Amino acid sequence: MSALAQNYKRKNLSFSSGKGSFLTSSNGKKYLDFVQGIAVNSLGHSNKNLIKAINKQSKKLWHVSNAFKIPEGEKLAKKLVKKTFADSVIFQNSGAEATEAAIKIARRYFFSIGKPHKTRIICIKNSFHGRTLAAIHASGSKKMTQGFGPKIPGFDHFKFGDHKKLKRLINKNTAAIMIETIMGEGGIKVIPVWCIKAISDLCNKKGILLILDEVQCGIGRSGKFFAFEYAKVKPDIVPIAKGIGGGFPLGAVLMRKKVAKAMVPGTHGSTFGGNPLAMAVGNAVLDKINKNLLTNVNKMSKYFIGNLNKLQKKYPKLIKEVRGVGLLIGLQLFTDQTIFIKKLMENRLLTIRAAENVIRILPPLNVKKSEIDFALKAINKVCMELE
Ligand SMILES: *Cc1c(COP(=O)(O)O)cnc(C)c1O
């Protein structure tokens, strides 16, 4: 029996190495990896720039306390600020920590301007913001919170698309609306651009903050640096993680100046967050998330989604819908997707489930057309078998 706790239902498959879009299993079989650690390895496996960056930094300095200045972190924060809506950054180590910090920052902002009663955060029911106690209660998911009481107060929920309810939920105690720009775990549910705009307008009108969780859809995955850029809105707080570390655990909260001002010394901290090793990798990843790479994301996305739509028309009883933006793609089936994913694996294509019978397809952002062709062939073959 495994000495690991059984909190994951793991597939009987492990890997010994990876290169680009491919993984080699411990028994020597090659797989096309369209999971990439769940949208984490944005540049694929064993990227030479990242290897160089981590090797170089590992010989100089791994970790120092945030009691001291960390130039590598200053550099990465400056780049993020230059590239985005943000004026200021706090580094963390994961997505859940980043969303948790976002909640803290929103509350502390209102506390700092003399409105300490404004603490409530409005979220979408059955969303995903990570697995800490606050984040699971923010998600409003029965499955994730069951057995983890008492309920953490301070979160209100509305159903995806129910703007009437959303408006009704806002009251004098509301601090922020926090949503994923694209709901990843929830089944690659893309929130329409008009909807993001309406929510942003509502926040401005009511004087509350907009937190857009871009942990999964951010850092180029949508074809823009941030998915909310499609809606041309300016959020107040944006937690990021997954893609920014390229495989190294790294998260961050990006924010506007007015809220950053509330985070005075002592209000938040992390032992590991923003250490030199993580920052060296983050810098190397960010340097590669450039115009060329985004062009590749958009080109490959158009090709991939276009061909998946053709497969949907070819197998209309099996595939319900193709969802997604950029290289955050979902194939929604009419029935449970478990067997489909298993058969794709037998055909050497790795994908991962999401809610609503969705097969999540997450290639690295530098994926090649020939790799997408391999995936399309495997998907077509499995469709033929299961039709
Ligand atoms: C993955 C994810 C998180 C949590 O990230 P962890 O690094 O697993 O803590 C939070 N929000 C969204 C949208 C995510 O996809």
Image (tube, rainbow, N blue to C red):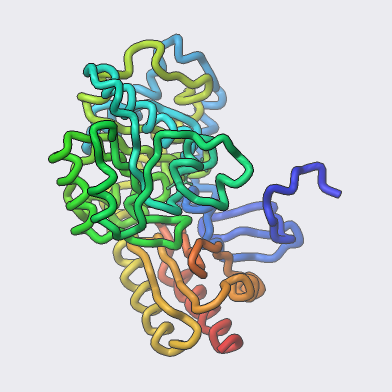
Q: Is residue 138 above or below residue 321?
A: above
| Quadrant the C terminus occupies | bottom right
Picture quadrant where residue 69 is located:
top left
Of residue 314 and residue 115, the one placed in the foreground of this image is: 115
Query: Residue 49: in sight, yes or no?
Result: no
Q: Count all numbered tags in the image, as a single digit.
A: 0
Q: Residue at x 64, y 71 (%)?
A: 342
Task: Examine the rendered structure and indicate whether residue 87 appears above or below residue 170.
Answer: above
- Residue 142, position as x, y percentages in the image: 53, 51
Q: Residue furthest left?
A: 205
Residue occupying the point 59% across, 75% down? 340
- Image position, residue 121 (x, y; %): 34, 37
Q: Is residue 42 left or right of residue 306?
A: right
Q: Front-most of 38 and 144? A: 144
List x then y, in percent, for residue 240: 39, 40
Image location (x, y in percent) of residue 320: 43, 79
Residue 49 vs residue 186, the one in the foreground: 186
Q: Residue at x 25, y 25 (%)?
A: 259
Which residue is drawn at the image coordinates 50% and 73% (left, top)?
Answer: 375
Q: Which residue is situated farthest in the right direction here? A: 1
Q: Quadrant of residue 55?
A: top right
